[in-house]
Image: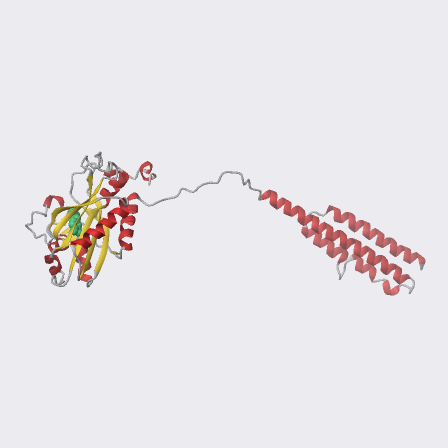
Amino acid sequence: MIGQLEDLLGQLDELLTRASSELETITTSAALEAWDTHYLGRNRGELKNISSVMPKLSKDERPVVGQKINAVKTELEQRLTAKRGAMQQRELLQAMERERIDVTLPGRTLPAGRMHPLSQVIKEVTDIFVNMGFQVVQGPEVETDYYNFQALNIPVDHPARDMQDTLWVSPGEILLRTQTSPVQIRVMEQMRPPVRVVAPGKVYRNEAIDATHEAMFHQIEGLLIDEYCTMADLKGCLERFARQMFGPGRRVRFRGSYFPFTEPSAEVDIDCPFCNSKGCRVCKFTGWVELLGSGMVDPRVLRQVGYDPAKYRGFAFGMGVERIALVKYDINEIRLFTANDLRFLRQF
Ligand code: DAH
């Protein structure tokens, strides 16, 4: 049986050589797995087939062949492991090459939007009042004559009602609000004191348009009603606002004025933030810039909404947002706010 033994050993050597050189040529992992099954497969692998003759061998031959089979098996398994490793390494390198990025390239910046300057001013102003305990509310832009005028102590024949300034939807009845003051009435109708609200929004006037006048602009209305409230509270509140908005050192001036819905009424000025009162274009060489209108709420207005003027009193104020923005940023043309020119808007 010597011949058969040598034949077997020869077959195993041949198998080792053939499987090894075939392994060298493999480039895909599918082919690698097929190779594994073909040579080392537990069921019908070539090596397994050769092993199946073992029982027919003599006692002396068996260990010789067994050792040889094991040696071939170990050798092929090592080569397979090495090949797998090499292929994975190559695939990794290929993937890295494919996905290579140049981290030194400059980034592509996305164009970032931002808040319109008027929205920024509205936010700044309302934030200051929110921090003083005020609540932000809104009212309709299309109003009735009652809320925009009558309830605010501006009767039909009142000189404060300049018919030419009002944009009517339905003459004498429905209009585009000319001020945010009607929100005061709507709030008081809905709430019992204490009331502390600010109401930003659009207002409309039938104006001749120029560098400081537009047919649509924004106002912020303020209203505080409580059992105890004096002109000193009004002054303290608005001084605090003016200094937070325009700088801690600002001087604030209260000038007696007239509004139908407040008594007494005052206009509030600050010393010009641009020239420190020396006189410049912004303050029209007066040293002062007008900020807002204000006053103690007229008892007739309180009575109108069912508040008892003997029990409650309060103050109100109203400011033009565009005006404040023009002063704050030293802009000389109100129409820039609605022109949508990015060269302008990008500056804020
Ligand atoms: N509504 C006034 C206007 O449009 C501004 C104003 C003045 C509002 C005095 C007020 C106020 O609340 O008390 O000119």
Q: Quadrant of the C terminus?
A: top left
Q: Quadrant of residue 247?
A: top left
Closer to the camera in the image, 2 or 308: 308
Colour scheme: secondary structure
| Residue drawn at point x = 35 percent, y = 44 percent | 114
x%, y% of residue 216?
21, 44
Q: Residue at x 22, y 41 (%)?
A: 271
Query: How many marks do you count on the picture?
Result: 0
Relative depth, front residue between 239 and 319: 239
Above or below residue 208? Residue 88 is below
Tell me if 162 is positioned left or right of 91 in this view. left
Residue 180 visible in the snapshot: no
39 to the left or right of 117: right
The one of 104 and 239 positioned closer to us in this rendering:
239
| Residue 133 placement (x, y as % from top left) | 26, 57
Image point (32%, 39%), residue name: 345
